[in-house]
Amino acid sequence: RRVLFELLTEILTDGMDAGVLRPLPPREVAALMIAALTGLQYKEIGGVRFDAVASAEMLEQIIVAGVSQPTE
């Protein structure tokens, strides 16, 4: 997990430095992303059943949209 965390932090930092991603705290964003993805281990929450692939794709869209730098 440490390797994944460090790699994701590096990717986020590079994207922020390039102006592609919003300037957010990269370590905190990486930790939150990993925590969100870890939740996909559950098959059902609150009566909502998860399809692993569809859930991962939706989460990717939410995360990427949330950290992407808006274009003008």
Image: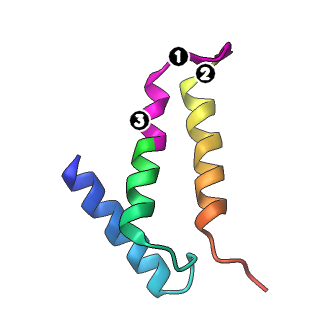
Q: Does the magenta stretch include residue 37?
A: yes
Q: Which residue is drawn at 63% across and 31% down?
A: 54
What is the quadrant of the C terminus in the image?
bottom right
Quarter occupied by residue 57: top right
Residues packed near mark 1 inside 10 Å, few (<14), some (14 to 19) or many (20 plus): few
Position of 13 compared to 58: left or right? left
For label 1, the residue is 43
Q: Report helix, strand or loop for mark 1.
A: loop
Distance, label 2 to label 3, CA atoms, is 13 Å
Q: What stretch is highlighted in magenta?
A: 36-48
Name the residue type under label 3.
Thr
Are the residues at dot 1 and dot 3 in contact (C-beta closer than 8 Å)? Answer: no
Q: Where is residue 4 in the image (x, y as percent from the top left)?
A: 27, 53
Query: CB under 8 Å between callouts 2 and 3?
Result: no
Horizontal and vertical percent position of residue 45: 59, 19
What residue do we see at 34% from left, 66% from top? Answer: 9
Spatial CA distance of label 2 from label 1 is: 5 Å
Disc 2: which residue: 50
Secondary structure, mark 3, is: helix
Label 2 Cα crowd, 10 Å radius (few <14 / some 14-19 / many 20+)? some
Residue 54 shown in magenta: no
Q: In this view, does 26 lie above or below 39?
A: below
Task: Identify the residue under disc 3.
Answer: 38
Query: How many marks overall?
Result: 3
